[in-house]
Image (cartoon, rainbow, N blue to C red):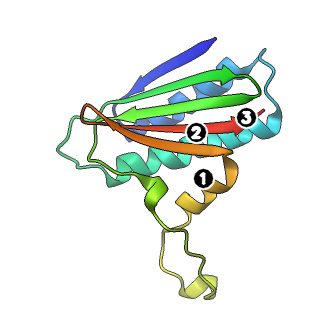
Amino acid sequence: MELRIQINRVEEVSAALTTIEAYSHGLQISRRSLHHLLLIADEFLSNLFNHAQQSLDIQVEIQLTRIANHWRLEIEDNTWAFDFTTIPIVFSTSEIERRKVGGLGIPLIRSLVDNVSYQRVQDKNRTIFLIAQ
């Protein structure tokens, strides 16, 4: 079974997450895996729209499939090339009040997935997350 969703605006992220959650009902997905899946999708998609060029007609396709004992979340977009797998993870030791805003999303996503890969295909970013069942 496979789920495909297309969105074009940040305002559609919430509806996409609701669709993913509704799709999961009746499937054998643990509550933990579903929570991780929704958190990854929310964080990644929110950042994608927040950092994309505002003048661009953004097109995002989300695909969810089950492969053996993993869920495969593929997000493909037409924004500027950005391979978040190359961003080093830096943990700050400063107090929370003194830290600048941002920088926690990538480490959070990486901590929740078993594997993540990136490809640039025909002027599109394709990021694939594998989440254990």
Front residue (pair 44, 110): 110
At label 3, the amino acid type is Leu
User: Disc 1 marks which residue?
Assistant: 109
Left or right placement of residue 14 versus residue 31 in this view = left
> Which sits earlier in the primary sequence, circle 3 or circle 1?
3
Residue 34 - label: 3
**Few, some or many residues within 10 Å of mark 2 (<14, 14–19, 20+):** many
Left or right placement of residue 15 versus residue 122 in this view = right
How far apart marks 1 and 2 lie (CA) works out to 9 Å
Would you place residue 18 above or below residue 27 in this image?
Answer: below
Look at 55% across and 88% down and name the residue there.
Answer: 98
> Which sits earlier in the primary sequence, circle 1 or circle 2?
1
Labels 1 & 2 near each other (Cβ < 8 A): yes
Q: Residue furthest left?
A: 55
Look at 61% across and 54% down and name the residue there.
Answer: 110
How far apart marks 3 and 2 lie (CA) works out to 13 Å
Look at 29% across and 49% down and name the residue there.
Answer: 52
